[in-house]
Amino acid sequence: MAEPAWADWIRERDDPEIARGQPEALDDITVLDLSYKSFAGCYCSSMLAEFGAEVLRVEPPEGDFIRRCTPYGIRYQGEGLNYLAEGRNKFHITLNLEKPKARELLKGLVSQADVLIETYRPGVMDDWGIGYENLEEINPRLIFASITAYGQFGPMSRSRMPDYDNIIQARSANQYDTGEMLPEGMSYDDCPWAIPTKAGPWIAWANAGTFMAVGILAALHWREMTGEGQALDVASAEAYASLEDWAAIWYQGAGVINERFGNLNTGGWLYCFAPTKDGAVFLGALRLEMWQAFADMMGKWDEWDAANWTDLASFSEREVQLKWARLVFAETRKYTNEELVGMSVEYAKTGRLAPITPVVAPVCSPEEAMHDANWLDRGIFAPVEDPVYGELVIAQAQHKMTETPIRTKWVCRPVGYDNEHIYLKYLSYGPRRLKALKEAGII
Amino acid sequence: MAESTWRNYIENKHSKPMPLRGIRVLEVCTLVLGPSGPGFLARLGAEVIKCEMPPLGDTLRSLVPFGYFFKDQSTSLIRPNPNKYWVGLDLHTPEGQEVFRELAVKADIIEENLRPGVLESWNVGYRQIKEINPSIIYIAKTGFGQWGQYARENRPSNDGAAQAMSGYSWMSSFPGQQPIKGRLYICDSYGALMGEVAVLAALHYRDRTGKGQYIELSQSESIMRTMSWIWPYQHITGKTAMPAGNRDVSICPADTFRCADDTFLALAAPSPEEFKGLCIAMDRPELADDPRFKDHTTRLQEENAVEILGIIAEWARTKIAEEIEGLAEKHGFAATRVCTIKDVVEDKHFRARGFMTEVDDALLGQFLDYEFPVMMSKTPPRVNWTVRPVGFDNEYVMINTLGKSEEEIEQLYDCRALGKWADVRGRRPPPDWDGKAGLIIARD
């Protein structure tokens, strides 16, 4: 019997719908997440919790300030919406680290943990006697992960400045060269939107947390080989700056400081957002044949002399791009998003250069994305039934895996929700002793 | 801080091991989404063998800012591709496929980003490789994953498509204006990073059980994962999440402000102490007690947020960025000029930490690259060397890894399974190359 088609075969093995019954990659790992005022730290521990690590999320008794960072101040059942999306699969306990007794409790947890994540200003943990060098003595296998604005060493490491997403975006140079170009003869007063523009989502925080997750997993592999733990240090602006692709080399080689280029791409043609009858589409054609296919698809093969184009490099200069953008946009404006996407799919089947076809993708609102049948089918927005908060939609199942798929067991927990279970499990504290700790302001 | 742990980190890092030492990765990737993942692993010490289609190789070799090549090399190729071994291998040929399968038997991880089913049609797909190496970790990265409507339509994708379709660009623009495509290839680079979380989690699982697995990753789904409040907000309120320019609607105050000299500054001061510090810095201490601004939740409400951001904007317009940065340091809130690439490359702190790290390369000479941004006290990641022409390390990999004889290698060239670079910019060595520098084995 012939093997089933690849898509069917793999879906049978990695559809998130069957994730629940599968093994978990990290279910032998215990993580303490002490992050404070930092979405990066919460996001980092989420990455590990999705793979089954037991994450103990440690907050001060009043809850982490990050819970109160929520759009327009909106709360759902008392919870901020960002935190709601990133409390997933974690046990939430409280511990007032200002108190010496609380730090003793923490040491008890550390001796049973594999990973500790923290985001306090460098020096704070050391001053409390629970820095890496203190905890390493208790547990030499510990992986101690710090995410901060400036990192643990270097001339700015003692800076008092806190670490926020918009600051990281500005400091990393990735805001400066994104945004609309100021139209000629206009000022910022005329066009207050034609300025350096940051990304809306907390990408710089998420990115710092994800880099740290990769670092932690690499350190776990090393520990598997040698038994050694270690300290890890992420400075969030470095993490975000490091995703940049060519501007640093361009500056070093040619002395050019990269500037905004609107919805075009300094790094190559054809790669832009183009206006349409009902919105905009992304157009991508980074190989000559794809750019030719685009010209052909728009009925401009002869008029634009596409048969005689010899390489894409001749379209990449600034003025040339601006000239061609005008020609291209005049054509795309004649169609709707849906028509253009359909033309590209059709061209892949029947076009002169088929199966080569340009990338055409609609610019969507997140509302459209959330209702797109393709993503719904792939389980990204499958509603989660949370025992505390009820049915919620959060983004999940971003990887599909055949052996150890990620999953969302619950989305969030109120402050201190798991104190009883966790302090009993790890430190043998029953209800009477727990009550005493609570009264003493320790948990 | 852990002062003695980090003392002399950059002086000592080259005499320490790297954490993924001994892990071998095979790469069949182009552009940014694909190669960045193995690029991260290579910075962590894995041995990455990058297989490119000779003689032109990776499409990224053509992509440069406004036509600028760095010593005849693609400026864009450098960041995703450090520390790799470069093989020119034509997987359309049966002999090329056989070489790949020989390498796959000796590999721990395979990474590819071609369209679904392409590698299978070349007899090196997951179903074929797992038969000869059951513990392989095999990741495929695409726009839309391996199944579902868009995968079925065989749609191509780019970073910009993912920015568009996820709603990411929509959320990254000013109200009433066109959505802005972010200048970074964020869905590529971040998607690749997200992929490595899965790869390394799978490696941990393999360390425990010996079992490999298959991973599929979509760049759109990866970026959607980062968009936190947007999904529950839409689900709960039934409204579309709307863009807010440079203002962070979850943190108040947090926005970008125009300074006296028409430069821009980002500022954030949401916690009680930070906000109080800002009010003192503005010489308006009474604002900290104003009922409209008294706590974070109150400040975040639309009318209050607009009000306080207006007050800060007016104040910032009378100062230069440097002055506000100084006040932020003094009073404990956050502020920074919107940095240019020059600021980043020349940043003294980044240099002192070895984040902007000096590469001393046999082909490209000296330049600064980004170090892997997780400093690791016992196993420091690092960039040792940079990009190479197509097929540059063929002999090294064929002899050292596969034990092939000169004659066998000759045959592989004859049947065009192996090949080297075309004599064009982005593919060939730098103009001052002496024909030997950087080659590991064949220097004749």
Image (cartoon, rainbow, N blue to C red):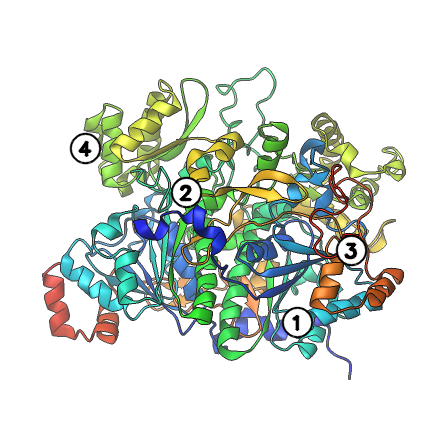
Element at label 4: helix
Q: Is residue B396 visible?
A: yes
Q: Is residue B298 left or right of residue B261?
A: left
Circles 1, 4 touching at the beta carbon (< 8 Å) = no
Query: Which residue is at the front of the view, B155 or B9?
Result: B9
Q: Nearer the viewer, mark 1 or mark 4?
A: 1
Residue labelled with disc 4? B289
Residue A38 rendering spot, x and y as whole percentages: 35, 49
Give residue B106's mark. Answer: 1
Element at label 2: helix
Residue labelled with disc 3? B53
Residue at 60 percent across and 27 percent down: it is A255
Count neighbours of disc 1 (C-alpha within 10 A) and say few if under 14, some if 14 to 19, many if 20 or more: some
Q: Which amino acid type is marked by label 2?
A: Asp
Q: Is residue A407 left or right of residue B83?
A: left
Give residue B136's mark. Answer: none
Query: Which residue is at the front of the view, A49 or A227?
Result: A227
Residue labelled with disc 2? A165
**C-alpha distance separating marks 1 and 4:** 66 Å
The answer to whether tags 2 and 1 share a subunit is no
Circles 1, 3 touching at the beta carbon (< 8 Å) = no
Q: Residue furthest front?
A: B444
Circles 3, 4 touching at the beta carbon (< 8 Å) = no
Circles 4, 2 touching at the beta carbon (< 8 Å) = no
Q: Residue furthest top?
A: A185
Residue at 10 percent across and 67 percent down: it is A436
Residue A411 against residue A164 in the figure, above or below: below
Residue B434 rendering spot, x and y as whole percentages: 75, 42
Q: Is residue A81 visible?
A: no
Residue A146 against residue B264 in the figure, above or below: below
**C-alpha distance separating marks 2 and 3:** 40 Å
Q: Is residue A139 left or right of residue B188?
A: left
